[in-house]
Image (cartoon, rainbow, N blue to C red):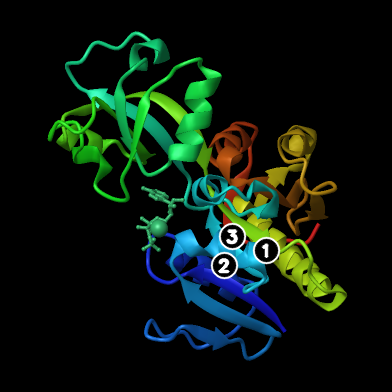
Amino acid sequence: MIRLAIQKSGRLSEDSLSLIRECGISFVSSTYKLKTEATNFPLEILFLRDDDIPGYVQDGVADLGIVGQNVLVEAGFPDLEVEALGFSKCRLSLAVLRNQPYAGAQDLQGKNIATSYPQILGRYLAGQGVQANLHTISGSVEIAPSIGLAEAICDIVSSGSTLLGNGLREVETVFRSEAVLIANQELSAEKQDLLAQLRFRMQAVRRARRNKYILLNAPADSLEAVKALLPGIKSPTVTPLAEPGWVSVQSVVNEDDFWHITGQLKAVGAEGILVLPIEKMIS
Ligand code: ATP
Ligand code: ZN
C-alpha cells in the first residue's frame, strides 16, 4: 500500500483526481473525507492543504504527493520532485502600481515587497543583487500596494486580470511552475515498485493527451509526401484501398502540430482525414 497526498480543495484538486482516474485507478471520493482507498490498486489517497503536502512527504507521513513546484520550492524540498505532470501551469511574477516607473529589478532596491513566497523571491532578488524588504502575507497579496503596505508584490499570475483590477502591472517573471509528483526519498522496495508503476501509467496518460491518432486516404503517388508529414511512432501504417491508386494511412500526430499538418496533408491530396483521441500511449 502506498499513500498519495493531494490538495483537498483548490486549483490542483480536480486535475489530480482525473489524472489518478485516467491511470485506471478507481476510488470513491468524498470532499468530506480526509482519505480514501483505491479499489483496484494498493493506493490510499489523503486530502490535505497543498502547503502541508511537501512537509508530510518529506517526513514520510505520506509517501507521495501532488503539488505545485511553487509550493514545493518555497517549502525548501525541491529534491522530492520525481515527475512533472503538465497541469496547473502558472508563474510567480513581480508587479508594481501601474503608473510607477520601472526600468529593471534594480528599481526595487530598498522597496517594500509583499509576497507569500519569501524564499523564492529572496533568492531571485539576491541573484539580481537587489536588497528589498519582504513582507510575508498569506493571502490577498495584490491589494498590498493600494493600501500602502508595499510598493510592489510578488504573486501567482495566470491571466493578469487580477493584477489589472488592482491597478498593478506585471514587470518580471520570478518563477515558472506546474504540478509535480513528489516522493519521499526513503521508500521501501515495495513502495518504490508501486511508484514505478504509477509513473509508468502517468507517463502513458500524458503522452496520450499530447497526441492524436490520425487516419486518412491519399493517392498512392503522394504517399512519400504524406509520409514525410507523418513520421508516426515508428513509421505510418499504409494499407491499399479497394480503389486502385489509393492508400489509407494511419499515424500519430502531436496535438500542437495537428492543425498545421492537416493543412499540409490536404495540400498534397489527402482526403477523408479522421482524428481520434488516444486513451493510453505506451512507449
Ligand atoms: P489551499 O487551501 O489548499 O492552501 P491555495 O489557496 O493555497 O489552497 P490554490 O489557489 O488552490 O491554492 O492553488 C494551488 C496551486 O495551483 C498553486 O500553488 C499553484 O501551483 C497552482 N495555481 C495557482 N493559481 C493558478 C492559476 N491561476 N492557474 C494555474 N495554476 C494555478
Ligand atoms: Zn495553499
Q: Which mark is residue 19?
A: 2
Asked which secondary structure carries label 3, the reply is strand
How packed mark 3 is, by other alpha carbons closer than 10 Å (few <14, some 14-19, many 20 or more), is few
Label 2 SS: helix
Q: Earlier in the sequence, mark 2 or mark 3?
A: 2
Q: Is residue 161 above or below residue 194?
A: above
Say above or below: 27 vs 10. Answer: below
Q: Is residue 252 left or right of residue 49?
A: right
Q: Amino acid at mark 2?
A: Leu
Q: Nearer the viewer, residue 222 or 100?
A: 100
Q: Which residue is mark 1?
A: 202
Say if residue 66 shows up in the picture.
no
Amino acid on which disc 1 is placed: Met
Residue 264 position (above or below residue 230)? above
- Which quarter of the picture shows residue 101? top left
Q: In terms of sequence position, does the residue under pointer 1 or pointer 3 come before the other?
A: 1
Residue plotted at (37% across, 15% down): 109
> Gap between marks 2 and 1, in whole Å?
7 Å
Q: How packed is label 2: few (under 14 Cα within 10 Å), some, or many (20 or more)?
A: some
Whole-percent x, y for residue 172 in the image:
40, 23
**Marks 2 and 1 close (CB-CB < 8 Å):** yes
Quadrant of the image where one finds ligand 1: bottom left
Residue 227 appears in view: yes
Q: Circle 1 sits in a helix, a strand or a loop, which is it?
A: helix
Considering the image in quadrants, where does the C terminus appear? bottom right
Residue at the spot x=51%, y=46% of the render?
Answer: 74
Q: Residue placed at 83% from the left, 72% from the top?
A: 193
Image-based side of 184 in relation to 267, left or right? right
Label 2 or label 3, whichever lies nearer to me, is: 2
